[in-house]
Image: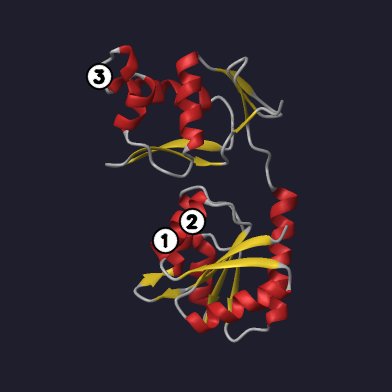
Amino acid sequence: MATRLLIVDDDPEITSALIRGLCLHGYEAQAENRADRALTRLQSEAFSGAIVDVMLGADSGIDLVRKARDSGVALPILMLSALSDVEHRAAGLEAGADDYVVKPFSFEELVARLRVQEHRAHTHRPEPARLAPATRTLSTTQAEITLTEREYALLELLAQNAGQPMPRGDIFDTLWSAEGSSNENVVDVYIGYLRKKLSEADFGFEIKTLRNQGFCLQGLTPLPEEP
């Protein structure tokens, strides 16, 4: 299966050339020319890496990378730019980019840099925590916690929507409304219970509160236990 990459660039000629060239090197490349759509895809789709231009029309590729990292996107990201000064390179790397390639560039160099980052990501990629429904446990090779039935259901729901904010009302409707409960504050109570238990060890993710949006699981999404 070809490695899927997302190219984020608002220059159609460069995008087209990258897609063709990467295809010849065994990659499946797709493109976005807007930072907001690219962020949504990086959060929700299974890409193995991304190539992001620093300048995206009125948007900033550096801001896109920073937002992606803040939301838990961990895949390798290379930045492209015609700006070669140290300040711009530093800004891109500080935002979370793994490498910075200056235009014009050798295609062979770009592919080589991609492969280096893919190798590093594969070598250092942590294992996600596992959710076991039979025992209602969340575990890694180093730690394990036991959840109540409602805590488990809440964490499972957040994991199924990882990277996307879930409004408090939607969580309430899914987990509590059928029982006749009428106070959405119960969601905050159980979020608090979960956070307290998650603080006992590093499970690779955290539950974020996004103002006016809801709750979001960010980081390495826990997976169902393998049968």
Nearest to viewer (mark 3 / mark 2): 2
What is the x, y in percent for residue 157? 46, 30
Above or below, 174 relative to 85: above
Q: Which mark is residue 58?
A: none
Q: Is residue 84 in view from this perspective?
A: no
Picture residue at 71% right of the left edge, 49% below the top = 124
Badge 1 or badge 3: first in the primary sequence: 1
Picture residue at 53% right of the left edge, 37% below the top = 205
Q: How far apart are labels 1 and 3 at the CA level?
A: 35 Å
Picture residue at 31% right of the left edge, 41% below the top = 213
Badge 3 or badge 2: first in the primary sequence: 2
The residue that label 3 is drawn on is 183
The residue that label 2 is drawn on is 41
What is the x, y in percent for residue 174? 37, 25
Residue extending farthest to the bottom is 104
What is the x, y in percent for residue 162? 49, 40
In this rendering, would 44 be left or right of 119?
left
The residue that label 1 is drawn on is 37
Classify mark 1: helix, strand or loop: helix
